[in-house]
Image: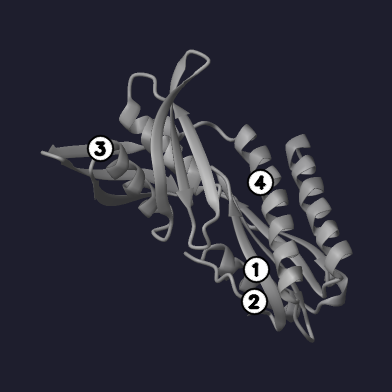
Amino acid sequence: MTERALVLQRVVYAGLDALRLVLAPDLCACLHAGATDSPQLYLRAPELSSLSATEAFTLFSALRDLLYADDVAASPQTVAGYTAVVRSTAGQATRAVWAVGRWDGSFDPYQEEVASELITGVGAVTHALDDAAAPEEEGSTIRVSVDSDGDRARAEVWVPVGGALRSATAEGPSSSTAVAQATLATVNPSLKLGSVAEDVIDGERAVLVLVRDTTGRAGLGCAICGDDSVRAVAQAALRAARMM
């Protein structure tokens, strides 16, 4: 096991231990995968040794289906017989699904909120470790096409999502808005564009993209404009989307 993989494992298990300490769940698990790697199961409850081969496979399969689902419901759901709070997290190169639940009973709204906030925080650290080690492929992979017609612009964007190249189109009052909306649509069509703005940061012109999910939670992405401000908008929008 590499040093990075060991640190990643420690971070994931620290997050699961925090969930277990605060909520005392019967199920406390994370399934983590890179763009080309096989999913890795991290399990704190139940003990893996207590599961039969069939039970372990059922749990792994349920989490794997959630890992690759286009959208994970915010409401509690059944995972291999457990009533669980399930949340997805993602970085530039990796994704994960976290599940914390009870076999007999469920969490109250406050406990669900605690679980969600803990998962969001630990997930952010987990994917930051992955992103720091992953090769920067956005600049060479993102492709953008923009057509303007008077006061309207139409953009088509191709971006890497889950190891594949996805495309989407969108229209807007400016090329920046159209590109940002098209980029978000490739990752998650339910994400809403808040704003696109350019600013100078320490002498460098950068673009900032603010997005919100269906609950109103915000994510912010940024990119240096360089000599291609339109592609920078797509990069910033992609980074914002992957925070959600």
Query: What is the C-alpha distance between the residues marked 4 and 3?
Result: 30 Å
Nearer to the camera, 76 or 13: 76
- CB under 8 Å between discs 2 and 1: yes
| Residue 62, picture quadrant | bottom right
Counting residues from the start of the chain, the first of labels 4 and 2 encountered is: 2
Residue 80 vs 182, above or below: the answer is below
| Residue 98, picture quadrant | bottom right
Give the residue pinned by disc 2.
76
Identify the residue at horizontal 63%, vertical 57% (top origin): 39
Type of the residue with mark 2: Pro
Identify the residue at horizontal 77%, vertical 85% (top origin): 105
Query: What is the C-alpha distance between the residues marked 2 and 1?
Result: 7 Å
**Mark 1 residue element:** strand
- CB under 8 Å between discs 3 and 1: no
Counting residues from the start of the chain, the first of labels 3 and 2 encountered is: 2
Query: What is the C-alpha distance between the residues marked 4 and 2?
Result: 22 Å
**Where's the N terminus, which quadrant?**
top right
Query: What is the C-alpha distance between the residues marked 3 and 2?
Result: 39 Å
Residue 175 is tagged as 3
